[in-house]
Image: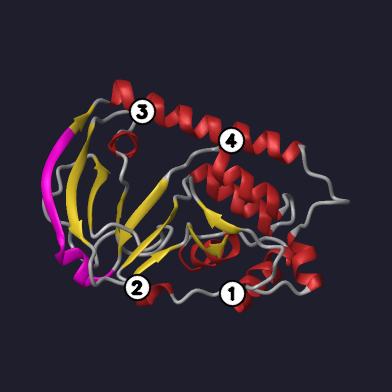
Amino acid sequence: MKEKLTIYHGSEKIIQKPVFGFGNKYNDYGLGFYCTESIELAKEWACSSELDGYANEYTIQTKGLKILSLTSGDYNILNWLFVLLQNRKFRIDSEIASQAKAYIEHNFAVAYRSYDIIQGYRADDSYFSFANAFLSNTISISQLERAMVLGKSGEQIVAISKEAFERIQFVKAVSASKELYYPKKLSRDTSAREAFRKEKGRGNILTEKYMIDIIREGWKNDDDRLQRVVLK
């Protein structure tokens, strides 16, 4: 990661000073300030069907900060899923999903709370449903990996420590029109769901590896069958 980043936070409000410890603790990576390097993506996140919004622009000096990049090639999709499981509210409504959660937490843990910044996939509603489907043994691990890339959910940069918050410097707020950016948000979600539908249709229970196979075969974090996650 570069030593100085320009990042954007989509919101219905102008936020000149993000407040440490404030927000929704059930976001992907827990409490934090969720940003992106894409101003266009931030504008989509900012708009609802009823309200315009803002892409709040900031700079942050990252030198000396501990950065966890889940899409750097050092981690796999199950590491990302572990972090998600610690924070998002999953629907654990079957025995396989319950065992899958326990298995991932035991074998693919990441000490993410010791970092200042986390960089990784954004699990909006459509992508969250993919993760749920994988835990329930409905889609394979390769299908989950492909769906995350094909749907282009984007990558988020999340400040989670007090020191990271203190380095965030407000630059300006750029307005985003709901007439333009809310349809773009809907289109992105539709594309993600379509990619998921196509991937789900390509699944082959005879050749693909599902969560139940991972448990039965005892996959661990260093298993060669796991792809390293690199978001392009």
- The residue under label 4 is 193
Q: Measure the C-alpha gap from mark 4 to mark 2.
A: 32 Å
How many other residues sit within 10 Å of disc 4, few (<14), some (14-19) or many (≥20)?
some
Q: Measure the C-alpha gap from mark 4 to mark 3.
A: 17 Å
How many other residues sit within 10 Å of disc 3, few (<14), some (14-19) or many (≥20)?
many
* Residue extending furthest toward the top: 179
Magenta-drawn segment: 161-174
- Magenta segment includes 213: no
Tag 1: amino acid: Glu
Tag 4: amino acid: Arg
In this picture, residue 9 sits left or right of residue 90: left
- The residue under label 3 is 182
Q: Measure the C-alpha gap from mark 3 to mark 1.
A: 36 Å
Q: Earlier in the sequence, mark 4 or mark 2?
A: 2
Residue 145 higher or lower than 53, as above or below? below
- The residue under label 2 is 115
Tell me residue 65's x, y (percent). 26, 71
- The residue under label 1 is 105
Query: Which quadrant of the view contains residue 197?
Result: top right
